[in-house]
Amino acid sequence: MKKMRRLLAVLACLGSFCAGAAYAADEPKEAPKDIVLTGDAKCTSCHDEADAPGVLHIGKTKHGTRADGRTPTCTDCHGDSEKHVSHKGSDKPPKPDRTFDKQSATPVAERNAACLSCHQTDPKRHLWAGSTHERRDVACSSCHDTHAADDKVRDKRTQAEVCFACHKEQRAQVNRPSHHPIPEGKMSCSDCHNPHGTTGPKLLVKDSTNATCYTCHAEKRGPFVHNHAPVTEDCGNCHNPHGTVADAMLKTRPPFLCQQCHDPANHLGTIPGVAANTDLSRTVNGRATGSPAVQNNGLNSVGVTQGRGCLNCHTEIHGSNSPANASKALRFWR
Amino acid sequence: MHNNRVFKRTVLALAVSLAFPVSSAIAQEEVAELISPNVAEASVKLQHLNEVNPLYRQYYGLAEEGMHGSADLKVIRRSDEGRWLRIEGRDLGLRTQEFGASVEQQGDWKLGVEYNQIPRYAPFRVITGVTGIGHNTLNLGTAVDDKDLKTERTATSLTATKFISRHLQASVTFKNEDKKGERLFGSNGNVGGFLGQLFTPEPIDSNHKQIEASLDYATEKFYVSGGYYGSFFENKAGKGLFVNYGTTGGTGNPVAVQGTPTQMSPLSLAPDNQAHQFHIAGGYNWSRDTRANLKISKSFATQDDSFLPNSARVPYYAGMKRSDLGGKVDTTNVFGSLTSRVTDKLGLLASWAYEDRDDRTPQVDYLVDVAHGGVLLQNNPESQKTHRGKFEASYRLPQGFNLTAGYDYDFKKYEGMDELFRDEITENTYRVDVRKSLGDTVNGSLMFAHSERDGSSWGTTPNLVNDGAHAVGLHWTAPTQFSDRERDKLKLMVDWMPVDPLSVQFAYEYALDDYKTRIFDIGLNEGRSELFSLDASYRFSDRWKANLWYSHSTNDIEQKSLNSTFNSQCNGSSIANTCVPWGADLKLSSNAFGAGFDGQISSKVSVGGQYLYSRDVNKYDITYADAGTLSSIRQGAGMLPDTEYTLNTLRLFAKYALTKATSVRLDYVWDRREMDDYTWSSWSYSDGTRVFVEPDQITRVIGVTLSHAF
């Protein structure tokens, strides 16, 4: 580092010497030039890519597009920061008026106000005020890197990592065997959620859970001749879209899931069992039954537990559009 | 930031530029490169897959072992006038390929197109004699063969936005998505009183078009917007799935026979449907600290796809004269919110969301329910109204603390649903949280919420005693979403940055749902979950950083039911009339661990790696009462093996810059997934189809990527 400083000093002297040949000694000193943004010389005369984080690569972003008259300059976000700029001496200068790092002393609302002064007019951010993230003091800079060309949260392959910084339960769930293709980078959290605020529950992009799911699963919208009440009400009654161990992202595997709602009359309260353990010709007391049930009969332990469980027969569980005069249609068999 | 640095690269550039004019040009070029977004890169990737494994290929789409070639492309150009051109392609040549291109005059207009493929392979292997898979007529052949069940989505989107004036913005998005393939479905095999299950994969061949257009006028003071969203679903696979086999008879396991269609054939397939939504919205900033928002939308959804014609296979009720459902659902949504910072320290929020889902489908007689007393039944349009209200106050305390107290109101009113449910449900939630989020080494939050849910009286009276006509146990269960419930939630999160390069995060979550069921505790009784998580990241230098995390969670569910047989009277007079109460305690225990690093060995060599471990263990603890010699429970029922899923994935890469423009990257993936699950174990369909899940799957992928920047 010392060597570097010496080199810089020598170069600076050389520069001064050569400059002296060209300019009269009493000529006013040339003001530092802007590098990326209009008026950024105030900052870039000291700060550059060697800082952590580097500042110049903001030039690669939309914030660095000078031709767009709306783009800000450093002080629009960080404040005039006069004390910081005019600091003399070798000790650490006071921080700029507004900082955005994790340990920033700038209140979150003030940090966000810097962004919202332009972005509040974006249609997707109209509902930021009052949104869960706003109310929980989440800073824009908690998720966004405004200086980077590749903002991690805006790339669907890396977005989830940013969300998982807070949403730990979902991080574990997406790695379960039944999941949406989030770990594979084919879907992102923002396909279903708008973290900037929405009218729907859980910051879902549409007005309701079902309306959000129908954007990809429109075949479930119906209505059907025979509707299934929990399906019509909320897909989240049965599914956990972040991932589950049970197939089809079901919260619990059938028959347990179905038995949580359905009355136990007839075969609905059947105790689950698997073929490997169950002897269908005998009762629990070892008594042979008069009519031994067949192994994959829909009304016995095995038939409601293995394969698709209850859905082995009730396959039209999202609703049946069969007009047939058949009670099995009513019960989603056909 | 290292704000005290005196000598900077830009300073160096300036000094050099003054001293050496030639060097000046080089330095300016370097700065220009640092601030320019322009990129033109192309990559060619070859990856070798050692083995096809059903779980790994699920969404990666690599369904053949051996070599796979693909290409990536990235072009970004920005002119001095602020015009952007972006072209990006990923995985070109693979099933997961995607492509996007856009042209944009920043702050004025943008046009874009995107293409995306998402494959989905069923995570198992099927060996079956069923033919016609993927089509609407299935037969049972004599030869059995391997079959992959898969679907593939291909979506193309077009986007256009335009600033008509400084404040007025118009945007239109159109998305066309096709989905093709087949997925697991099923059917009862009943032909003549014999049951059994059939393997009847559902054919998927659908198209979904969506269009979204909006006009938005926004200033710093207010905004108004209006828009339209249209969704059009078309099922090209047909209206019904015809299954030309079924179980006609026999003892033991019923065996399906070709040419004897199950009584369930044809199975109905999803009908075409459409939805149109119009919305208007507005917001107003009464002051710098007070804002109000309002959004009203109205949706019109219809489903009038023609029915399968009246036939012996689809017998219409004599009085049913319709040729389609005539489904019509009108939905009104209203959302309003008011936020205000009343003082420097006190902030308030009030919001209200209303939804009226009005199912206006005509009700006609469709069937006679012979199995349940010969009742004449109609279709069941389901309407519901929902109110969600929220009131919240936040108070800023000294030393960066913030205290928030909130109340949430949730009300649902159901109309036209099965009469045994409740008409109204109300849930009240009270919550409080305290958090600290201002510059210090320790920040965090603690939240506690308590909810109480109840509702109006239940519909049809539960069948408690032997009435000689109905099974005892009828209408005993309270469907979960209608049940009384008390819910407690606790969340704690702590961020600790003891020294600059080290960041540690701790999270704990606990939730308890206590359900009061309708009668005899039948149904879901209790749900309990707990999560513990620890994250740490460390930056060794500007070039090297690492992170690791661990989380442990548990999820317990307690539920009860009653084992009985068809039309059981539960009076203990015989095995058929003996009912046995039983309960299940379902436990899920999950452990997950992740670690990663990346760094630069030299200016030419960078490396990185990630390791992920995840293990889920489900336990099913079933207990039942001793019903003596008249117990109807089959021997061995209730003995469910644990199910376990373990994922181990290691990803490593090394990248070497051959020149400034050309680099080569090596990737290695080692992926092991172990699945011990009873779902398909010792199970066969009545048509002989078997489904196999490989219990231990190891996949190795080696990839070489050559990239060049132009």
Image: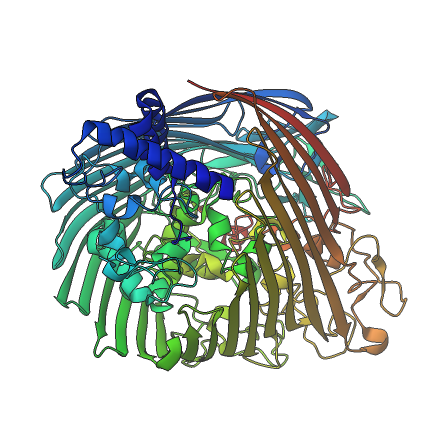
Q: Is residue B235 left or right of residue A198?
A: right
Of B552 and B620, nearer the camera is: B552
Q: Is residue B708 left or right of residue B407?
A: right
User: In the picture, which quadrant includes the C terminus of chain B?
Assistant: top left
Residue at the spot 68% in from the left edge and 43% down from the top edge: B649
User: Where residue B308 sits: x, y (%)?
Assistant: 43, 37
Q: Is residue A155 visible?
A: yes
Q: Measured along the vertical axis of the image, is residue A259 above or below residue B647?
A: below
Residue at the spot 75% in from the left edge and 69% down from the top edge: B622
Q: Measured along the vertical axis of the image, is residue B482 above or below residue A33?
A: below
Q: Quadrant of residue B24?
A: top left
User: Where residue B489 sits: x, y (%)?
Assistant: 51, 75
Of B430 and A58, nearer the camera is: A58
Here the colouring is rainbow
Q: Is residue A325 visible?
A: no
Q: How many marks?
A: 0
Q: Quadrant of residue B19?
A: top left
User: Where residue B607 sits: x, y (%)?
Assistant: 61, 36
Q: Measured along the vertical axis of the image, is residue A55 above or below residue A210?
A: above
Of A67 and A159, nearer the camera is: A67
User: Where residue B503 sits: x, y (%)?
Assistant: 54, 60
Q: Is residue B531 left or right of residue B495?
A: right
Identify the residue at the far top of this view. Answer: B710
Residue at the spot 59% in from the left edge and 68% down from the top edge: A260
Of B146 and B459, nearer the camera is: B146
Residue at the spot 71% in from the left edge and 32% down from the top edge: B700
Q: Measured along the vertical axis of the image, is residue B45 above or below residue B383?
A: above
